[in-house]
Every structure is written in structure tokens, then in C-alpha cells.
Image (cartoon, helix red, strand yellow):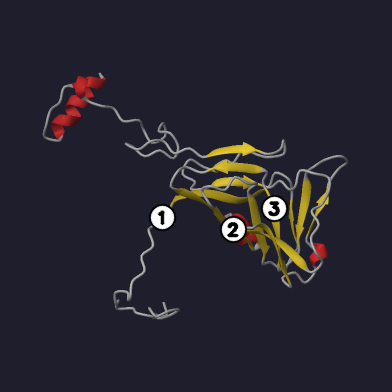
Amino acid sequence: MLARRLRRLLQTRGRTMPASEAVLQPSPSKRQKGSVPGEPTARLRFTKLSENASTPSRGSAGAAGYDLYRDLWSSHAAAPILSGSNAAIGQKSGLTCWPELLLAPALTMCLPIGRNKSAYDCVIPPMEKAVVKTDIQIALPSGCYGRVAPRSGLAAKHFIDVGAGVIDEDYRGNVGVVLFNFGKETFEVKKGDRIAQLICERICYPELEEVQALDDTERGEGGFGSTGKN
């Protein structure tokens, strides 16, 4: 029955082919997620650094990013941060402190919940930010970097944005998410909440070449707003 249908389909396209030579391609729903026909399957390897870590997941079959779930420092002691400073993830230096960025640093803290539990609730006051740990360690596919992107629901409903969203291919530390609260209300993060999404994007590593001058373009040095108002 299937061979007969294949012959009819091929005949309508102007050529015939023995059914034995026809190659059936898997349907998009049965194809491995993230795979492209003719290319090896890309794999995003990850390790859970504590029992509180959650496996990254996609909200739908067509979702671009893997949801990252909130989990903070898996210890009973809070990390000491200098008064008047805010902790943020730096690209090379790991945990760095930026003075003068927080107006009320005592309000941006991680509060323990329950007795003898290593999970924490995070409270982010209006116009402040906090570094939220996922307790996930990842190994990105070769030739890719990880982009930590905001979740549309948090952005639209609570004015929550994500910063410092680049994960280098060779980074093997705990994935942290820098959350900015641009809203007027205090935002509370609970353990297990989906706070961001991880997207694997291909990256080009070009060789550097110093030249005396660059090619001229029609736009030239035109910057913000130079291409029109709309």
C-alpha cells in the first residue's frame, strides 16, 4: 500500500523510482530536537551541582530556548557582599562587586526558607538586581555560545529583564542569571521558578587583521536614528 502511494507521488512529479530505492525522511515531530537533516545532532550536556537543580526544559517543541529554573547558593551561609555593593557575574572574573549601583543593598538578599534547607527565596526590590544561581553546569556544543535570554511573561507582566547573558563555550561554572527588576513592585523569586531561557547560538571566531583603512559605505558613521525615524 505504501509502495503504491510512493509510485503515484513520484509519477505526479514527472519521474518514477522503484519503491525500494525511495528513502523515507522522518517527520519533524519524530526528528530529534535540535537536529538538522545531514548534520550531526547537537548536544547540550549539563551537570546538576546540587539536588535542588532542575533539568532545563523547553516549553514547546518549537521553543528556541531551554528554560532555566531558579536555585540559589546550596549552602546555609549567605555570601558576604560589601555594604554599598552589588554582586554580578563578570565575563572573566567570575563574581565581581560593583559599588554605588545599589541604593539599598540590604533589601536585595537571599532569605533562607525552612529549617536546614539549602534553597532560598530571592527578593528583588524595584529598580534593583540580583544574581540568581541555577546550580546547573553546562558544556555547550562545539562552535556555539549560550545566550541567557529573558522570558517574555516575566518581561511583559513584571518588567523583569536579564543582563550579562553570554556564556562562553569553555565556561564550566555554575550558571548564574542576573535579573533586573525595572518594575514598581518588589519581585519575589521562588525555588523552582522559571527565570530565564538558555539559547544555543552558533558563533564565528574570525582571525584579527589590522588594516590602514576600512571600506567606505553609504551609511558611513551614521549612528542612532541615522536611517530614519520609523
Kindly identify the amino acid type of the residue bearing the numbered disc 2.
Answer: Gln
Crowd class of label 2 (few under 14; some 14 to 19; many from 20; radius 10 Å): some
Q: Do the residues under discs 2 and 3 have CB atoms within 8 angstroms?
A: no
Relative to residue 41, is residue 197 depicted above or below?
Answer: below
Q: CA distance from mark 1 to mark 3?
A: 30 Å
Three-letter residue code for mark 1: Tyr
Task: Say which of 64 and 212 sits in front.
Answer: 212
Q: Looking at the image, is 142 positioned above or below residue 104?
A: above
> Which element carries disc 2, helix, strand or loop?
loop
Q: Label 3 is placed on what type of residue?
A: Val
Q: Of tags 1 and 3, which is closer to the observer? A: 1
* Residue for badge 1: 205
Kind of element beneath mark 3 = strand
Query: Residue 129: x, y in percent?
Result: 70, 63
Q: Secondary structure at mark 1?
A: loop
Q: CA distance from mark 2 to mark 3?
A: 16 Å
Q: Which residue is mark 2?
A: 91
Pointer 3 residue: 132
Residue 16: x and y in percent read: 12, 28
Place residue 56 in its image quadrant: top right
